[in-house]
Image (spheres, rainbow, N blue to C red):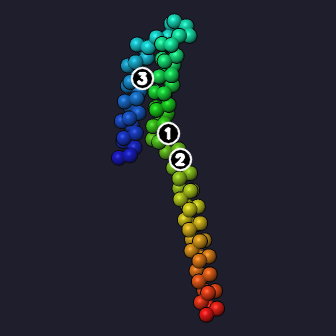
Amino acid sequence: MKGFKNVIYMSAALGMLFYSVPKLQFSEGLSLPMIFSLVWIAMALLVVAAHLHQILGVDEERRKELTRINRMKKWQMEQALQGRKKILQFRK
């Protein structure tokens, strides 16, 4: 379901982009309408790129690696605490 949402949102952003680009003003040189048009297109492309990034699963490997590292740290902490517990029981 998560990937489906990203496809829908990316399609909506692309649709807005294709609909609005012919209506934006680019011919007046460096004016406020042209700056607005460029910023608007850049933001729309950023939204499309973010959804495409999620769809392709570029961070999936990094997320799995971080999960593995966190599990290892948790295991090491548990081992350290169990070692201290044994030492304290031995002293009694």
Kind of residue sitting beneath label 2: Asp
The correct choice, above or below, for 12 with respect to 29 in the image is: below
First in sequence: mark 3 vs mark 1: 3
Question: What distance separates the C-alpha of mark 3 from that of mark 1?
Answer: 18 Å
Q: Amino acid at mark 1?
A: His
- Residue 85 as seen in the image, left or right of residue 57: right
The residue identified by callout 3 is 17
Check whether the beta carbons of the residues at disc 1 and disc 2 lie within 8 A of each other.
yes
Q: Residue 37: where, in percent of width, then height?
A: 48, 17
SS class, disc 2: loop
Residue 7 as seen in the image, left or right of residue 39: left
Which residue is found at the position 61% from the left and 87% from the top? 88
For residue 17, above or below residue 50: above
In the image, which disc is placed on residue 59? 2
Mark 3 residue element = helix
Q: What's the residue at 47%, 22% (across, down)? A: 40
- Count the marks: 3
Give 73 or 6, whichever is nearer the viewer.
Answer: 73
- Mark 1, residue position: 53
Quarter of the picture containing the C terminus is: bottom right
Residue shown at 46% from the left, 32% from the top: 47
- The dot on residue 71 is none
The Cα–Cα distance between marks 2 and 3, rounded to whole angstroms, is: 26 Å
| Front one among 19 and 40 | 40
